[in-house]
Amino acid sequence: MKNGRINCIVTKNLSRAFRNSANQGKFLEEFIPLYDTRFISLYEPRIDTFLNPEVVHSLEVSITGFMNEQYAYKTSMDIRRTFDTKRKKGEFIGAFAPYGLAKNPNDKNSLIIDEEAAEVVRNIFHWFVYDGMSKSGIVKRLNEIGIPNPTAYKRQKGLKYCNPQTHKNDGFWNGKTIRDILLNEMYIGNMVQGKQKVISYKVHDIVKTDERDWYIVENTHEAIIDQETFEKAQALHKRDTRVSPNQKKVSLFSGFLRCADCKKAMTRKTAKNFVYYCCSTYTRKSKTACEKHTMREDILEKALITAMQRQISLVATLSETIEEINNAPIIHTESKRINNLLREKQKELKKCENVADNLYMDWRTGEITKTEYRRMKEKLEAQIRQLQEVVANLEQEKEILSKGIHTNEPYLKTFLKYKNINHIERGILVELVNVIYVHKGGELTIEFNFADQHRRILEYIENNKRELEVLESKRAI
């Protein structure tokens, strides 16, 4: 029309041209007359802008446009509800399966493993978790050995895959792709959908959705990555593990060392063939802001091995004690500490709820102003939410303790797996250690993983202390 190549448009009816009343008005009343074009609708309401140009302003045309828009809206909502139902049931509704997976040829809503690509996914997780490679190092490795990136791989397989950035894709891997793979729960057998959505049936732009609105259904297909490796990858991803551009691997302690005073990360330096760690605040900001906290890497490694050996020995003792308790005729699974704390928090919660209930009447009777009412109401609601969360956590802890403690607990199994440890690898560090604090003078504070489970086991042993003493006295006799 703008180029003068079309001067007449013929449609069966208005719905074939417009499903948006705003667009209908814009085109019929402004755009088409502006370019001197004839518009004809053959069925009711009949329109011919050449013979009767005023008909486009009629009430019948406006109502028809509105009805067509409502039909499009209803259809869109029906389709969305159908898709949401499928997502909730764990049925895959995407056009293309994630890299490493494929649509089941016998059921388009289920996924199977694509072994060729799945092997690359397994390598990515292994390199990242156990070999200590950085994301940029993994990118270099994959590009060096000529592995096509997910977009190029799909197109090689004959899939008509495209996205807004397809024309820019050069077949090489990048850090974002590696990051997305490492964070994707689809690789442990969980169906994750709804990460993006179309704004509306009128606006087709795609936007990201909040993680709380994702549809996640567990164990819908065969896993490529085991749960343990996946969780280690998530823990590593959260750490600051930057590496120099010319290096593929992160250092052994990257992301684990912190200054005991300022709690900032330690920086790594080399001098006289020795590797040292120093407080980043002292090194990068100001020598008056914190102490140097220098620690040599080889000394740190020896100290950590010794600490791990002691912790493993402690875990072995705890495991033996638990086995003794579980063989006793009577086992106590109640926790006095948790019960007392739970009663205290429930009482506090009830008190806050009563105050909140009476607050409205205080305002209505004039004892407090509307401004005071709103301020106090917001404060109480926040306090109630916090207490409700604390109570829920305590009830969950109480339920866990009620089931007792067994020697196959993840905490015990993980540490006892390294009973004969004599060296440190990054994979071991990821499994056993949360953070290492370096103090002035070379002292270390090591926070091991499973701190909650450790405390729970100690409480379980304390609750059954009497039974242990009875068992000891019987053995002595």
Image (tube, grey):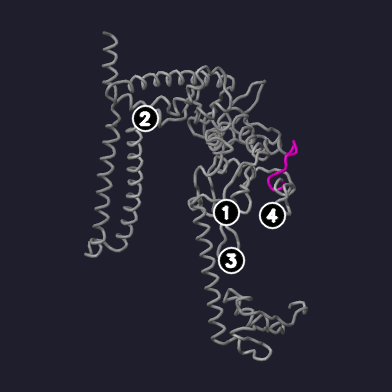
Mark 1 surroundings: few (<14), some (14-19) or many (≥20) residues within 10 A: some
Residue type pointed to by label 2: Arg
- Disc 1 to disc 3, how far (Cα)? 21 Å
Residue type pointed to by label 1: Ile
Residue 174 position within the rendered picture, expressed as x and y whole percent measured from the top left: 68, 43
Q: How many marks?
A: 4
Residue drawn at x 72%, y 47% as measured from the top left: 157
Q: Looking at the image, tell me whether mark 4 or mark 3 is earlier in sequence order.
A: 4
Residue type pointed to by label 4: Cys
Residue drawn at x 26%, y 36% as measured from the top left: 340
Residue 117 position within the rendered picture, expressed as x and y whole percent measured from the top left: 67, 40
**Residue carrying label 2:** 456
Q: Is residue 143 above or below residue 278?
A: below
Q: Nearer the viewer, residue 256 or 133?
A: 133
Q: Give the left or right position of residue 144, taking residue 464 as reference.
A: right
Q: Looking at the image, tell me whether mark 1 or mark 3 is earlier in sequence order.
A: 1
What are the residue bounds of the magenta stretch? Answer: 143-152
Q: SS class of the residue under badge 4?
A: loop
